[in-house]
Image (tube, rainbow, N blue to C red):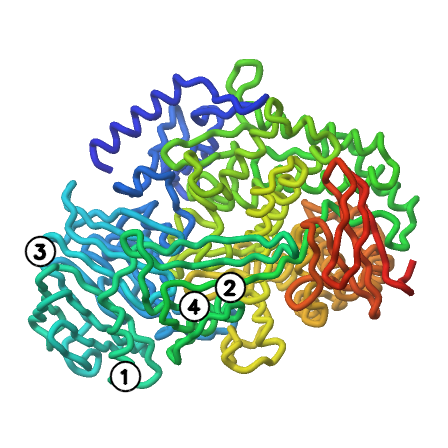
Amino acid sequence: MTILQWVLVVTGVVLAACKAPDQYGAGSISARIYPESYQCEDQEGQARIRSAGVVHAEVSSCEGQIRPQSRLPQTVAPAAREPAMAHRWWGNVVFFGEHAIGDPQGIGHITPDPITARITERGMRVMGIPAGLQVREDRVTYPIPRPLKEVFDGIALANSQFDDLDAFVRDYSDGSVTLEWRSGHRPVMAATFVQGSPYVYLSVYRGDLLVRTQAPDGKQKGIFHHSDNTLGIWTDVAGQRNHFLLTGQGETTFRGRSGKEIRVTSQTSHFTLTWLPVEESTPSADRVKAFLAYARQPVDEVRIDYQVDPADYSVTISHQYRYQGRPVETLAGLQSLHWKNSKQALTNYHVRSSRGLLRFAQTDGFQYQLAYTGVLPGLPPAVGTYDVDRLKGLIRDFLDRGPGAWNQATDTYWAGKQYGKVAELALLARTHGMTEEADTLIDGLKAELEDWFRAEDAGRSKVAKYFVYDERWNTVLGVHESFGAHQDLNDHHFHYGYFVRAAAEICRVDPDWCGPGQWGPMVELLIRDYAAGRDDPRFPYLRHFDPAFGFSWASGSANYLLGNNNESTSEAATAYGAMILYGLVTEQPELVDRGVYLHASTATAFWEYWNDIDGYRNKPPEFHNFPQAYDKITTSIFWGNGHSFTTWFSDAHAHILGIQGLPINPLVLHLGQYPNYLKEYVELGLTESANGRPSGLPEDQWRDIWWNIWAMTDADAAMGDMRRHGWNYAPEEGETKAHSYHWVSTWQNLGHLAMGDEALTADYPAAVAFEKEGRLTYVAYNFGGSERQVAFSDGTRFTVPPGRFEVRRSPGAAP
């Protein structure tokens, strides 16, 4: 940290200490974390702090006055003038800038697929992901060998005059990032990476560009092409063969071509590095020509927009490639989510990368379309053939524990899970005539959320359960933190999505609570934090959701060898589905559309990438995303460079697969889109069960979650196992016995989901159809204040009263 940065940190802390909480409606948010909130503990002789903001974890001691050291975003203008963005495939540069050669604490790589790179104080190490992908028992990744070396299994780019540079994010867009290396305040080099692109665009302002390889010409390195301004270099180290083209603008000189350090100069000092997708040992002349044709046409921005069609709530996503604000044609790489859902003409060039086949198109942009499966505030009453008295008894059992037992957590994740389940239970109670019980639950939710939504308690600072706005990182931090939500800006969509889900249920029955003078501005502040709209002055656009990939990243710091990661797609879908519910309740169409886009893309990406549904359906090989040697039908943690069949906390199959169905509610109905697949998914998830059923799982392996997942493909079997086991079990933290009982029994009559790709659609976001033995059940909930007619794509139409469910069945459907 420079002296100037330290002064800024100290000054910011002093100013924040003097600033009163900001008001948002009836709520408020603090400008700082109160020191009494810090949580400090000694771990193996090292004091570590939590709930202190975006800071270094290590402190000198847990005794006396603790002074955590803040982190600052490593950005320069123009990025420094925008809200800080970190949750991308390049996020670790914002957190750490450069990682020093040999630094064991700095393993972070950026992953502009098909390229991966490590940003260092000398420049960067660059490799092609497809060259090193390996299938192991539980993963498909590129286990980069000797990742802390300057160069090994690819090339390194460095500068002839400087070897101790600071790296920053200079600019970024929806699908690109520009990095800048500086010596002091003076720029030395810059590089622009574009997601899906084989090109890296380089500028050298001082000194000459150096290309370094592990070895000189020989078995590990050679030259396969040389023209006036282009040099083709291959490397073959540790079994990874890469082919690079380095192209200068104007007359270019390459000195020391046969050695392991090549000095490159050109008239303009602008270059393009091309990673060539090559299946043969030596690239053909035609391939070299095709990729060189666009190497001199730089891209500095990828604009990704969406449009929701109100006729069926399908979403059209458009990518446009630009340079200096104008469209530019390039050789764009389309991931499988893109080209499978697009009419874009493609070239014959492709490569198998970490998400399946990456196919290239000569274009200045492309579009693709995704279906939307629908969400509901809950499942309707009186559809299942359950015992109503038993259901009411289970609800009363929960209520009898008292509000003090409903939530004892003071961190955003575990508290949020409690709020989510209480919201589900409140709707269940109300729709079964238990108005007094439902009101009690809603009052409890209000008290909890209002507590969180006040930065002070009677004018005094709080120890826990309040929110802070960090002006440096442009983010909302909840106190206390869990899972690195402060230090690494992890998982805000997972945590805050539960709060928004609870708020949507409160406002469904008490709209005034979400009014602009009440608590709505605080709810919307959380939404803005994890999924703000474009041009929000206080938050980055769609913090967690990556428009270039079509799914979310969980980590802000992303300090991993494999890049960034995301595990629970279902918790992401819950966060985005909660936006839809809240937007419908508060009559905000733009918010509804944004939620529909995020939810539809998250759901489709779940089937595309986490489950390789086309591979399961035996489509042609080019449609398969998992390599043939990978012997599982699913995965759990998706990385920028591959995926792994595990979780952050367990290797149990019930957790690895169950994390993608948690929480179970009508915001994750897409999980049941392919019931035949889901049958095998359940079998795999229950592999380690003592009896192959949820009842045979240990107490800590989410027995009730698995009954709920199983119900979406075979509800009769799930209910049979639930009844045989009985009610003597500990529910998963975000689940209740009443909700599981109602969910499973209702699916007995619903059968399977009938929405999604190549299936039914509806003209209202909260309308869903189900199918059982050829008979359809249509369910809609009207959030509006007047009756609404809902239409499905098969011609079914009916009127839904305001604030009510409406259920219709095709002729012959079960009662």
Query: In terms of image quadrants, where is residue 442?
Result: top right
User: Residue 263 at x, y = what percent?
Assistant: 9, 66
Going by the numbered disc 3, the residue's amino acid type is Gly
| Residue position for label 4 | 334
Label 2 environment density (alpha carbons within 10 Å; few <14, some 14–19, many ≥20): some
Q: Secondary structure at mark 4?
A: strand
Residue at the spot 69% in from the left edge and 53% down from the top edge: 763
Q: Report how far apart the C-alphas of labels 3 and 2 lie in the structure.
A: 43 Å
* Type of amino acid under label 2: Tyr
Which residue is pictured at 31% across the width and 37% down the height? 81
Residue 676 vertical placement versus 53 (above, below): below
- In-front residue for pair 217/230: 230
Residue at point 52%, 74% (across, down): 626
SS category of the residue bearing label 3: loop
The image quadrant where one finds the N terminus is top left
Tell which tag, 4 or 3, sits nearer the viewer.
4
Give whichever of discs 4 and 3 has the lower sequence position: 3
The mark total stands at 4
The image shows residue 251 at horizontal and vertical percentages of 8, 68
Q: Are marks 2 and 1 in contact (CB under 8 Å)?
A: no
> What residue would you read off at disc 2?
368
Q: Is residue 517 left or right of residue 94?
A: right
Badge 4 vs badge 1, beta-carbon distance below 8 Å: no
Of the two numbered discs 4 and 2 on the same chain, state the one appearing first in sequence.
Answer: 4
Mark-to-mark CA distance, 3 and 1: 34 Å
Please state the horizontal and vertical placement of residue 250, each as a whole percent of the image.
Answer: 11, 66
Q: Label 1 is placed on what type of residue?
A: Asp
Q: Nearer the viewer, residue 135 or 194?
A: 194
Q: For mark 3, what is the residue? A: 207
First in sequence: mark 2 or mark 1?
1
Q: Are marks 3 and 2 in contact (CB under 8 Å)?
A: no
Query: In the image, residue 740 lies at what x, y percent?
Result: 78, 51
